Image: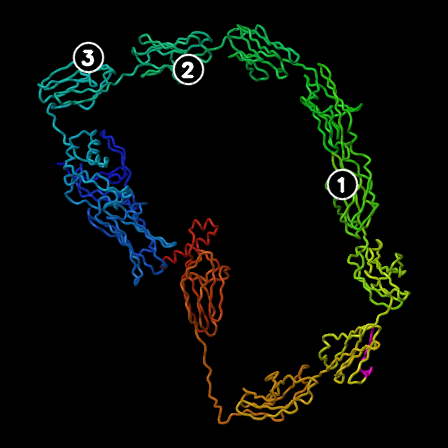
């Protein structure tokens, strides 16, 4: 019977349990399997006491990786947790048995909360249990409205042993946070073992999303499948596993559907193994033996049955008796002796007795190989043979040759050869080189030996040295030397740079001769040549000098005819390539003048393989041929370059303006005297007003001709024009402005020419001014006429007339004439305006007709003293006779002034009186024709007062008044009356009613006990009368039977100590938005109000504003931050006492200490805020 099993502990202190996902099979080679990762939901398991190997019965507790303390930390002091800010009841730790139920309860008070807080249940550090609810885990929330308490419950049903662990409950509400940790310990029931466990169900994963979906695994996420009915017979898998070899566990697990192979192996490991008593051996071999090399060893076994056949094996091969292996028998002992043990005897040995076998392992310890004779140092020269010899203490010993600490290669292609003769070992170098110099050593197991080999070069002898030579450019070059020894290679250098063979350069080494050949030399080949024999510090040197006649390479400039064109004013830098070795001397010349390098504006420079001519600012005088002369020891060369300096043309002469129009002119000019070396391509024209300094270009396309007509000028404004000449180089300077000219134009013809009057000897015409006059203005008009049928126009007015009406006199009666009018100004006469028809010179009679204005067709009304001025037009020819009558009588000129003209009559009264009122009759007569009109004039004045005002009746607070209309209405109807009253005591008049139309009225709402007088004004269209009519008697307003009783009165004492009628209220504020605290206080005399924060008076703090109006006290906090929260107090004090009210202000959206530091809040404010927060917490 196997003993009851218990859960193993993994190295990290986690309990072993079934793996939640498939893992690779574990090799069961007898080693302890690697610890697996802890399950996401580990439970703390308290196991029953079970006997252990040392016999202790102490209970073992396996701790999870949750927030609880590990067993080794139980002795450490636990810090006192901070006071809870949300939880009023916390879940407590519990211990249950497997299969039991347990509930954890957390309560949160909702008195100061606006909404339900958020709660989370965790197992360990990170597993959220909200996603693991199911059959075994349920979460519940309730709220009691009477006590305002939120209750949160977590129920664990039918707990399993892996539910043991540390749990945590976290509550969040806005910026508040609270948490609590508790432990759950699930104990196994007593008398549990492997006998009652169904191994196939115990080591299977939970089913796909069925009743165990809440067992804190992820199997519920797998695809849902219907479970299959297992009709296989019951098989005791434990017995099969116990009788099987470990390498067969995996096969058996898959055969019987066991997926948790790792958990199965852990259980199998815990099953105690029953050691079977050997039937063949009374004493077996030891697990291992050790022997020195060359010694002998005895392997002894004791048989239980001496008659059993015995066989010995070495690495699985049977051992036969030999002088090396000797078998002995002593009673039940069987002995195998191994003589002269060597390395080959280091192996695994076994002995078989019947069907049983026991094994052991033999280790042969080798003796160190010592060096008897070490190697000796060697000093030789290159190409000699070197042999190093060493002797060791044992033949056939393995040794290692080293050079400078690195093993010497001894392959087929290696320069080193290794050989051994008995105990002697040799290292041979047939052809020594300088690289073989170094420290050589031989290494054996019992010691080392080293020596230095020095390989030196043979002395160098020079039979032929290098010689300095001078060669023309392009000729072949040969450099040769002869040295001893002849087999020494070397390197060629030019100016310190290594020369490599190429198609042009050939390097030859034959015996003692070293030669460098170049088919065609170039300038780059010149320099210092050096030949350095390899391995020697001595070198051979010579100089190669290459000369070349000078040449000027003008072809590379690509200038046609070697002519360089440059715009004047620009900088010219002409760089011409030259060649020659050595560098030639260069001279620039213009004519007979040599251009020096030190010139200021013009200078010549030569550097490297080119020469340059520089002209800083080119001028016209720089044009010409320039000669270049090159000289060196190889010869002389010359060349010439022509420089052409082109410039903008000269400015043309001032243009001429021969013709000027109304808004245009015609201008001409001559070409410039110098075209700048380039043909003139066109001209630009500009104009400006004479008083202005701003020129305006008139053409954007070049003008090819030498004339132009500017247009769109303003008439009457003086202008000037100028011209620019343009060539390929640019635009010339402007010409001198032309003489000022003013565009002028004649006016348009006069308009609306008509005949105004005709007599027997004259004709009067009139017209309107021209529609367009122009800047030249209008000087006057010229009137011309001609007899019908002729073209002889006669000027009627010898002098220009400025009027638009003219009478032509001296005409013959009965003749017909045509009339035309011209307008004159400084530009000349305009086009004439001619009458369409001829005029008969004969007077015509026109009957009179009075044209009465519309406002005179009705009564013309004026106030007394105003002026009257009436104009009445009329028609008629010849001049009519006008007469005025009033009431059939002529009008007196002393009262009314009358003035008559040919077309109207004017009646004027300087100061109107009421006697001027009446109807005026106007008569107009021409020969026997008469026309009349009547004008009605009314002069009005202010009315007089009413004739009589009487008091008809007085009752209560009412008075009835009656009056008669005024005698003088002011020559206008009465429009109303104004009634006023006055108290007899003061006689101050007050208007009762205005614009009253009737002659009787009742005045109401009069004061009892007062005596009143009344007066009435009359009104017409001119206003109120200057005086009013007063009542002769007064009206007394009395009320009988009422007496006034006066009572004694005592003043009330209103003094009162301060008392708050409205207290402060706890307030929540949002950070960054202004907050106000309000309360109201009553006190007499007025109380002094003091505001405090956390018992500290607020004085001169710009973040606070305090108001007090009619007892309402207000504290405004500007843009509060979290450190503005706290306890605020309003205190009122006067002579009779004091009172105060408090409230708490909490600022939401605050910041942590780190965030406040990041925002740059001063440390003293942060410290103040933190201290205030602690005070509030302690008060809570």
Q: Position of residue 718 (x, y in %)?
A: 80, 50
How far apart are the alpha carbons under marks 1 and 2? Answer: 97 Å
* Category of crowding for the residue at label 1, using alpha-carbon neighbours closer than 10 angstroms: few (below 14), some (14–19), many (at least 20): many
Question: Looking at the image, what colour scheme do you see?
Answer: rainbow
Say whether residue 351 is visible. Answer: yes
Q: Position of residue 435 (x, y in %)?
A: 46, 13
Q: Which residue is mark 2?
A: 439
Q: Which residue is mark 3?
A: 324
Q: Compared with residue 706, is residue 1014 higher up or lower down, i.e. above or below? A: below
Determine whether the residue tagged by mark 1 lies in a helix, strand or loop.
strand
Determine whether the residue tagged by mark 3 lies in a helix, strand or loop.
loop
Q: Position of residue 218 (x, y in %)?
A: 28, 42
Left or right: 1029 as drawn, with respect to 324: right
Left or right: 8 as drawn, with respect to 1100: left
Q: Position of residue 680 (x, y in %)?
A: 77, 35
Q: Residue 845 appears in which quarter of the rendering?
A: bottom right
Observer-nearest residue: 1140 or 516? 516
Q: Earlier in the sequence, mark 1 or mark 2?
A: 2
Say whether residue 70 is visible. Answer: no
Q: Residue 164 appears in which quarter of the rendering?
A: top left
Q: Which residue is mark 1?
A: 684
Q: Does the stretch in magenta take in 614?
A: no
Left or right: 337 as drawn, with respect to 682: left
Q: Earlier in the sequence, mark 3 or mark 2?
A: 3
Q: Which residues are magenta?
A: 890-902
* Category of crowding for the residue at label 2, using alpha-carbon neighbours closer than 10 angstroms: few (below 14), some (14–19), many (at least 20): some
Observer-nearest residue: 893 or 822? 822
How far apart are the alpha carbons under marks 3 and 1? Answer: 129 Å
């Amino acid at each position: 019977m196997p003993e009851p099993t218990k859960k193993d502990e993994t190295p990290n202190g986690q309990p072993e349990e079934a793996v939640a996902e498939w893992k690779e099979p574990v090799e069961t080679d007898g080693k302890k399997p690697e610890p697996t990762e802890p399950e996401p939901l580990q439970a703390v398991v308290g196991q029953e006491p079970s006997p252990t190997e040392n016999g202790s019965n102490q209970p073992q507790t396996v701790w999870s990786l949750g927030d609880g303390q590990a067993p080794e930390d139980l002795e450490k002091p636990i810090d006192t947790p901070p006071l809870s800010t949300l939880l009023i009841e916390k879940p407590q730790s519990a211990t249950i048995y497997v299969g039991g139920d347990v509930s954890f309860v957390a309560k949160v008070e909702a008195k100061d909360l606006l909404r339900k807080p958020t709660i989370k249940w965790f197992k360990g550090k990170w597993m959220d249990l909200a996603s693991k609810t199911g059959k075994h885990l349920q979460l519940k929330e309730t709220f009691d409205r009477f006590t305002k308490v939120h209750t949160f419950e977590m129920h664990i049903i039918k707990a399993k042993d892996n539910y043991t662990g540390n749990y945590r409950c976290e509550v969040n509400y806005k910026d508040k946070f609270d948490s609590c940790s508790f432990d759950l310990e699930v104990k196994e029931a007593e008398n549990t073992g492997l006998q009652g466990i169904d191994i196939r169900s115990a080591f299977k994963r939970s089913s796909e999303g069925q009743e165990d979906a809440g067992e804190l695994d992820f199997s519920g996420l797998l695809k849902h499948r219907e479970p299959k009915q297992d009709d296989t017979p019951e098989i005791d898998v434990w017995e099969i596993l116990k009788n099987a070899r470990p390498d067969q566990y995996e096969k058996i697990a898959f055969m019987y559907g066991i997926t948790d192979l790792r958990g199965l192996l852990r259980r199998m490991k815990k099953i105690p193994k029953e050691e079977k008593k050997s039937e063949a051996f009374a004493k077996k071999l030891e697990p291992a033996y050790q022997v020195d090399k060359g010694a002998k060893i005895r392997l002894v076994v004791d048989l239980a049955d001496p008659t059993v056949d015995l066989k010995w094996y070495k690495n699985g091969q049977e051992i036969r008796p030999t002088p090396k292996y000797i078998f002995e028998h002593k009673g039940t002992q069987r002995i195998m002796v191994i003589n002269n043990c060597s390395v080959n005897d280091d192996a695994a040995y076994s002995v078989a007795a019947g069907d049983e076998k026991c094994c052991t392992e033999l280790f042969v310890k080798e003796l160190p190989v010592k060096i008897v004779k070490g190697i000796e140092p060697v000093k030789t020269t290159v190409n000699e043979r070197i042999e190093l010899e060493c002797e060791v203490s044992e033949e056939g010993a393995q040794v290692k040759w080293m050079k400078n600490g690195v093993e010497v290669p001894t392959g087929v292609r290696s320069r080193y050869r290794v050989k051994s003769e008995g105990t002697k070992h040799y290292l041979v170098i047939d052809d020594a080189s300088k690289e073989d110099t170094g420290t050589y050593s031989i290494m054996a197991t019992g010691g080392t030996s080293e020596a230095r080999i020095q390989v030196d070069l043979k002395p160098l002898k020079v039979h032929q040295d290098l010689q300095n030579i001078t060669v023309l450019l392009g000729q072949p070059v040969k450099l040769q030397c002869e040295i001893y020894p002849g087999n020494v290679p070397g390197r060629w250098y030019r100016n310190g740079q290594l020369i490599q063979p190429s198609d042009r350069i050939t390097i030859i080494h034959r015996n003692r001769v070293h030669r460098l050949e170049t088919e065609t030399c170039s300038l780059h080949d010149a320099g210092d040549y050096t030949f350095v024999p390899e391995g020697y510090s001595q070198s051979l040197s010579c100089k190669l000098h290459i000369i070349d006649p000078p040449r000027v390479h003008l072809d590379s400039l690509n200038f046609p005819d070697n002519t360089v064109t440059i715009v004047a004013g620009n900088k010219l830098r002409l760089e011409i390539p030259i060649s020659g070795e050595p560098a030639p001397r260069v001279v620039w010349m213009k004519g007979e003048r040599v251009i020096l390098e030190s010139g200021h504006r013009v200078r010549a420079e030569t550097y490297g393989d080119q020469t340059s001519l520089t002209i800083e600012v080119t001028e016209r005088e720089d044009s010409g041929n320039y000669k270049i002369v090159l000289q060196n020891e190889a010869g002389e060369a010359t060349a010439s370059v022509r420089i052409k300096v082109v410039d903008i043309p000269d400015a043309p002469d001032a243009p001429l303006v021969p013709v000027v129009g109304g808004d245009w002119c015609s201008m001409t000019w001559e070409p410039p005297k110098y075209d700048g070396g380039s043909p003139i391509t066109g001209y630009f024209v500009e104009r400006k007003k004479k008083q202005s300094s701003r020129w305006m270009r008139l053409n954007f396309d070049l003008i090819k001709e030498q004339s132009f007509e500017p247009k769109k000028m303003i008439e009457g404004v003086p202008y000037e024009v100028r011209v620019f000449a343009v060539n390929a180089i640019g635009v010339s300077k402007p010409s001198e402005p032309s003489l000022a000219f003013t565009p002028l134009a004649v006016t348009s013809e006069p308009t609306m020419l008509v005949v105004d009057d005709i007599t027997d000897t004259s004709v009067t015409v009139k017209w309107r001014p021209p529609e367009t006059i122009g800047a030249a203005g209008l000087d006057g008009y010229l009137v011309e006429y001609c007899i019908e049928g002729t073209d002889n126009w006669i000027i009627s007015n010898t002098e220009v007339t400025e009027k638009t009406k003219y009478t032509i006199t001296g005409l013959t009666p009965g003749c017909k004439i045509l009339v035309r009018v011209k307008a004159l100004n400084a530009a000349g006469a305009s086009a004439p305006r001619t009458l369409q028809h001829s005029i008969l010179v004969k007077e015509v009679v026109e009957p009179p007709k009075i044209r009465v204005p519309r406002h005179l067709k009705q009564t013309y009304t004026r106030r007394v003293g105003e002026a009257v001025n009436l104009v009445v037009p009329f028609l008629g020819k010849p001049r009519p006779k006008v007469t005025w009558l009033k009431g059939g009588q002529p009008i007196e000129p002393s009262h009314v002034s009358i003035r008559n003209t040919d077309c109207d009559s004017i009646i004027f009264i300087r100061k109107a009186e009421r006697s001027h009122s009446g109807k005026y009759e106007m008569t107009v007569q021409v020969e026997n024709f008469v026309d009349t009109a009547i004008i009605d004039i009314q002069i009005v004045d202010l009315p007089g007062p009413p004739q009589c005002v009487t008091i008809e009746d007085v009752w209560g607070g009412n008075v009835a008044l009656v009056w008669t209309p005024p005698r003088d209405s002011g020559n206008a109807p009465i429009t109303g009356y104004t009634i006023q009253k006055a108290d007899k005591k003061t006689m101050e008049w007050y208007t009762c009613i205005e614009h009253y139309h009737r002659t009787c009225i009742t005045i109401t709402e009069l004061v009892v006990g007062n005596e009143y007088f009344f007066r009435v004004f009359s009104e017409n269209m001119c206003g109120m009368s200057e005086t009013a009519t007063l009542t002769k008697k007064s009206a007394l307003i009395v009320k009988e039977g009422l007496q006034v009783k006066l009572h004694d009165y005592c003043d009330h004492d209103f003094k009162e100590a301060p008392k708050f009628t409205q207290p402060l209220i706890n307030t929540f504020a949002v950070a960054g938005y202004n907050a106000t605290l309000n309360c109201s206080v009553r006190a007499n005399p007025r109380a002094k109000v003091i505001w405090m924060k956390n018992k500290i008076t607020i004085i001169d703090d710009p973040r606070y504003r305090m108001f007090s109006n009619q007892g309402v006290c207000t504290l405004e906090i500007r843009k509060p931050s979290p450190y503005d929260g706290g306890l605020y107090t309003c205190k009122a004090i006067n002579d009779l006492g004091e009172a105060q009210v408090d409230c708490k202000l909490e600022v939401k959206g605050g910041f942590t200490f780190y965030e406040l530091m990041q925002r740059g809040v001063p440390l003293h404010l942060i410290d103040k805020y933190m201290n205030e927060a602690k005070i509030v917490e302690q008060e809570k």
